[in-house]
Image (cartoon, grey):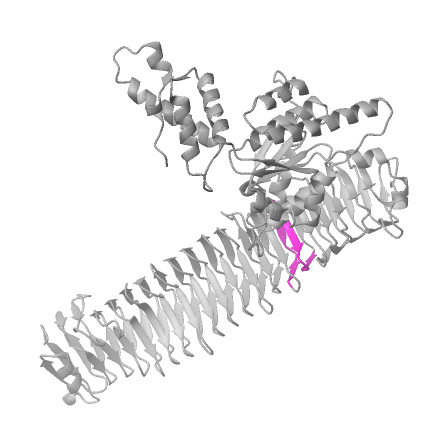
Amino acid sequence: MAQGTVQVTHTGTSRWRRRTGEYASLAAALEAAAEGDVLTIAPGTYRENLVVQRSVTLRGPEGSPGSVRIAPADGVPLTVRASAVVQDLHVEGQDAAAPAVLVEDGTPELLDMRIVTRSAAGIEVRGSARPTVRRCTVDNPAGIGIAVVDGGGGVFEECEVVAAGQAGVAVRGGAHPRLERCRVHHASGTGLSATGDNSGLEAVGCEIYEVRGSGVHITARATAHLTDCAVHRTTADGVTLDTDAVLTLADCRIHDIPENAIDLRSRSVLTLTRTTVRQFGRNGLSVWDPGTRVDANQCEIFDSTGDYPAVWVSDGATAVLDSCRVHDVPDALFVLDRGSRADVIDSDLSQVRNTAVSVSDGATAQLDDCRIRDAATGAWFRDHGSGGTLNNCTVETVQTGVIVTKGADPTVERCTIDSPAEAGFYVSADGRGSFLDCRVNDSGGYGFHVIDGCRTTLRRCRTERCARGGYEFADAGADGAPGSGPVVEDCASDESAGVRTPAARETAVQTAVPSAGLLGPIPEQRMTVPEPPSGVAEPETSVRTSKDVLGELDALVGLESVKREVRALTDMIEVGRRRLRAGLKAASVKRHLVFTGSPGTGKTTVARLYGEILAALDVLEKGHLVEVSRVDLVGEHIGSTAIRTQEAFQRAHGGVLFIDEAYALSPEDAGRDFGKEAIDTLVKLMEDHRDSVVVIVAGYTAEMERFLTVNPGVASRFSRTITFGDYGPEELLRIVEQQAEEHEYRLAAGTAEALLKYFTEIPKGAAFGNGRTARQTFEAMVERHASRVAQLAEPSTDDLTLLFAEDLPELP
């Protein structure tokens, strides 16, 4: 029943055929209307399900937008099956199984409509329908904003989806709409979605923001073209492609994304042109799987808010960056896994906190005419099978220019490295590589630093003004295996000594030079110890003798077997020193240790004393303790773990690196866990710096046994395992007595017996803290004592110092 009337103006070719009539319902007016008639609806609410099947104009009164409400109790409020014009209507739907506006045929125009509904879809276009929808608003917190399905199409101009319980715009079933200057926001699903064979989406000048899923999601062989669009403030990825999807982004802006700005997988293809990607929490571009490819031209990726590489290419995917800029990011480009490839042409990578280009796990990268500056590492080819080419590139203001390790074999041609803080080129750990017509200028370290007898080829290279020398070849040449060591041809340097060939290397230099690059931290966090400013004293080193420190060790409660082990090790070191002074050979003593046992058994305390003993014996320079765990060593992406581990190692230089719960670096379900990278880095550093850092790994006994089998080099680096047994009740009592004496408390008569009984009966499960439990018990007693004594008006000295059995906490 209508609350108003409908005026129908019937038009014809002759004046005498024109007439006007009024109808009490919309259905009656539509029934009476002929092709071309205009139906003007009076203000009111119409509880009717309208079906427009003729090419008429259906509109509200002029000057009263929103005054006509189409609001039936159920079903589809408005169905259009003809090339009609529908204008200035307010449509409300309540049927969760049906759309509010359904366009099934023809080329109708929907103008200035507002759809406020809780329907399956605000507007649904299907079949052969090709509507033009202008300046319409959809508010549908229960379903899809706009759905174009089953071959539908049409143009949506200046429309807005202000809320959607699912996708803002969903395209499927071979549909292909075009969106112009539309806005989609506050959707609980994807902003724009296209899925399925022959489905496509074209958007120009649109904005997608404040969505709880991905901004744009193209999948299952669908295609999309976005031009001059903005995607921002999403909860999930900005743009996602999956399963043979194809997307073109031109002149778009993607920003303020907490996850990946753009993520594509499963043979998807993305073309980016003049598009900016910024303020992303994970990867700017994340490219996965064989057949997946991204081509970026004149794009800019910058201002990362997370700790991930800006461009990530893995699992056999391909990325091409042409005339692009990547800057202000943790890492610029990571390429990993066999079959993965990145081609970077005429691009700039700058303001990179860690590594500009990282190639690992058999991947390939080719950089032509590129510029890298202001990075910790310019390019790092990490392991066996990894390679590619750097051609005519410049690298400047970096920590290390190019690093090649673990069997990687790149070709570097006509590249220049200016002003590296450490080495220009650094090759170690069986790295290879060919360096042709390359230059290094103004290095703070060596120009070319090749160690470990690496089979590297240098031809027609030149160095100038390198602080430590143009070329250094350590552990190579005549003393190496036949055929090992670098090949150097027609290379030059401005240093007076010229090129130091492998056969003429200086052993003293070999042992004194740290592994530049491998130990190179990120910019402005260099781990070399600076000279203290005037007036500021150096940190105080141990002045106690080894006998004094051993006395403190002996004073610890229990730990008898631990004390014997440490004393035996100390005796071996001391006797070795005396034998050397007497001109005799000293037995080699590996000082790295494994501590096993439950928490709270004194492992950290003994590690601290052990470092002080070694300093007193002049084995270590300082003897300080640096305690770390997995969270301090393992980063969130490849490369950051090595850097964190190197930084921890350098903080421990001259002392002890104590790794608590070390087994957490190798979880049983590790998969691609980066803990293994920390272990591999540690093994190498322990060997390279065995005289300057002692490493102690600690944890539960069974877990540590598994840890020692993870890497073949791990077990061989440690001289012995020391087991810390659990404290018995008597030893826990002694710890409490020591705590009481230290804090000027006394145990009243009967309290010691009560404590002994308490420690005998206390549950000793996985959370039992041993010495920690004793200290916590004492602290609890002191708190209960304070609560009791605070009630006394004038407590005596005994009241203030005596702890009674009643002060014991209840058993857990």
Give how far across and how far down residue 383 sits, in percent. 70, 54
The residue lying at 17 percent from left, 69 percent from top is 69
Q: Residue 201 occupies which quadrant of the picture?
A: bottom left
Q: Nearer the viewer, residue 598 or 439?
A: 598
Give how far across and how far down residue 671 sits, in percent. 57, 57
Q: Is residue 698 left or right of residue 685?
A: left
Q: Is residue 355 magenta?
A: yes
Task: Evaluate whether residue 446 shows in this view.
Answer: yes
- Counting labels gives 0
The residue lying at 24 percent from left, 75 percent from top is 86
Magenta residues: mostly which secondary structure? strand
Task: Evaluate whether residue 529 shows in this view.
Answer: no
Q: Nearer the viewer, residue 31 or 596?
A: 596
Give how far across and how far down residue 808 sits, in percent. 36, 27
The range drawn in magenta is: 340-368
Q: Residue 177 occupies which quadrant of the picture?
A: bottom left
Q: Quadrant of the N terminus?
A: bottom left
The residue lying at 61 percent from left, 18 percent from top is 536
- Up/down of 268 relative to 708, above or below: below
- Up/down of 796 relative to 592, above or below: above
The residue lying at 47 percent from left, 54 percent from top is 259
Q: Nearer the viewer, residue 138 or 542?
A: 542
Q: Is residue 83 magenta?
A: no
Q: Nearer the viewer, residue 639 or 31?
A: 639
Give how far across and how far down residue 626 sits, in percent. 59, 32
Q: Quadrant of the C terminus?
A: top left
Q: Is residue 450 left or right of residue 614?
A: right
